[in-house]
Image: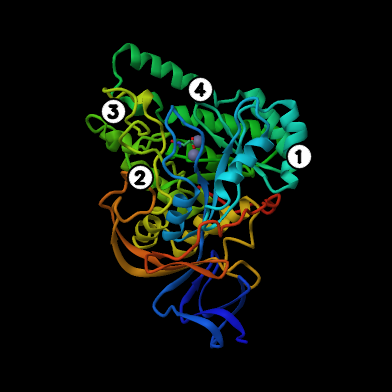
Amino acid sequence: MTEYDLVIRGGTVVTAADTVRCDVGVKGGRIVALTEGLDTADEVIDASGKLVLPGGVDSHVHIDEPPFYGVKDAGEFGTDTTAAACGGTTTVIPFVRQDRECSLRTAIQDYHAKAGGRAVIDYAFHIILLDPTDQVLGQEMPALIEDGYTSYKVFMTYDGIAINDGEILKVLEAAKTHGAIVMVHAESDHCIRHLAAKLDAAGATSLENYQRMAPQPVEREATHRAITLAEIVDVPILLVHVSAAEAMEQIRWARNRGLKVYGETCPQYLFLTDDHIAQPGWEGAKYLCAPPPRDTANQELLWRALARGVFQVLSSDHCSSLFEGPDGKTAHGPDPHFRHVPPGVPGIEARLPLMFSEGVGKKRIDLNTFVAVTATNPAKIYGLYPRKGTIAVGADADLAIWDPEKDVTISVDMLHENLDFTPYEGFEVKGWPVAVISRGEIVVRDGVVLAKPGRGTFLACERADLTPPVGTAVAS
Ligand code: URP
Ligand code: ZN
Ligand code: ZN
């Protein structure tokens, strides 16, 4: 019998803290050795000239959710986890969306049925709280946290989805009492309604007006309010999909005051702008998400904030509406109206290559920060660390072997997302994973998917230990 099931030899191993030349020995799905000169293995991958990174943790993805704006997802757990793996991600955390008057348990069972038998990589679940009754918060939530559902998302906008400040306070109190983390979609519902009504009245409904319905102050105000609510309760929160400098400044301000406020941004805010949405006709729908992408000046400010630790998490916020057809972003009528396009863009596969190429390759962030924000920090914040998100003896052997010189032109035809568009069509990137390993099994090699549907397993999250806070301190 050989000592290792798999050895990855001669690569440069990168974690959030270190970059070292060593081999990786894998046995029973876990990393068991990190040293030089490993040889006796059933299988050896030559990683010379390559980077060996922790498999990515994409901690904000929407997979097979109920229809949104009347449009259902084209992706499901098979397609979307395959796409994730092809892009170097080995753990995803999608959302369970609770229907009103439906128990959280029932909703969770539905999602397990959707994921089991299909997912090719491991997954945990966040829960979207639409109806935080006393029964939900006092009885269901504590039991669910025990079972590994430790993160809850609340929305401050969207018809039928938003909850009010009083409800958010109750959710935060329950999170504090029972040990959960609350994720907040921070956009001011009243401001959006007010501006949307004015735009409607003026007939300014084409997609170029979308940005006018949700300008930066809409996000800034809600971000500040969410931080205030969390401060009052004295509990950590995470602001999701932060689009621009004004909201980001609120997070920096809060962290500098010692509050446990975390921030997430996404590729769409680093690579897209409002000009993409303002294109004539329906074209802009391919780029429409909430909050809206802003401008190139904001992109640069977000990159700087990532490098300085204002953001701890970089996720895709992957959404899988088609563009064409009755279940597409263009489904609602002949004339584009910005209020009728389901917000959200795909990105589960391109997330890591885009960030590696434009972030590390263009020296906006270093390699260790890349690993921190795309794998290690989300694993820590959501209670999956050190099993996921790092390369260490005892951790799951979830690895992406990365060719830093591989040139790829992103196009919908080469992605695995089961969609008819990508907002990153034609983007040229340098760097792509050549082998992706999940619990010691090679799931993708040279672009060929080797994983069997259903091999992915559910991960019960621990209560996150957020002391000391995840991520670096933030100054000016
Ligand atoms: O545009 C977005 N972000 N759509 C997905 C739903 C959400 O708010 O995360
Ligand atoms: Zn959201
Ligand atoms: Zn989302």
The answer for how far apart the CA atoms under marks 4 and 3 are is: 22 Å
Question: Foreground residue, 356 or 127?
Answer: 127
From the image, state whether disc 4 or disc 3 is nearer to you: 4
Q: Is mark 3 within 8 Å of ligand 1?
A: no
Describe the element under mark 4 as helix, strand or loop: loop
- Disc tally is 4
Residue 291 x, y percent position in the rendering: 43, 34
Residue furthest toward the top? 201
Residue denoted by label 1: 142
Describe the element under mark 2 as helix, strand or loop: loop
Residue 132 x, y percent position in the rendering: 67, 28
Residue 139 x, y percent position in the rendering: 77, 34
From the image, state whether disc 1 or disc 3 is nearer to you: 1
- For marks 4 and 2, the one nearer the N-term is 4
Question: Foreground residue, 195 or 342?
Answer: 342
Residue denoted by label 3: 208
Label drawn at residue 419 = 2
- Hey, what amino acid is under mark 1? Pro
**Which residue occupies 42% across, 31% down?**
71
Question: Quadrant of the rendered structure where residue 406 is?
Answer: bottom left
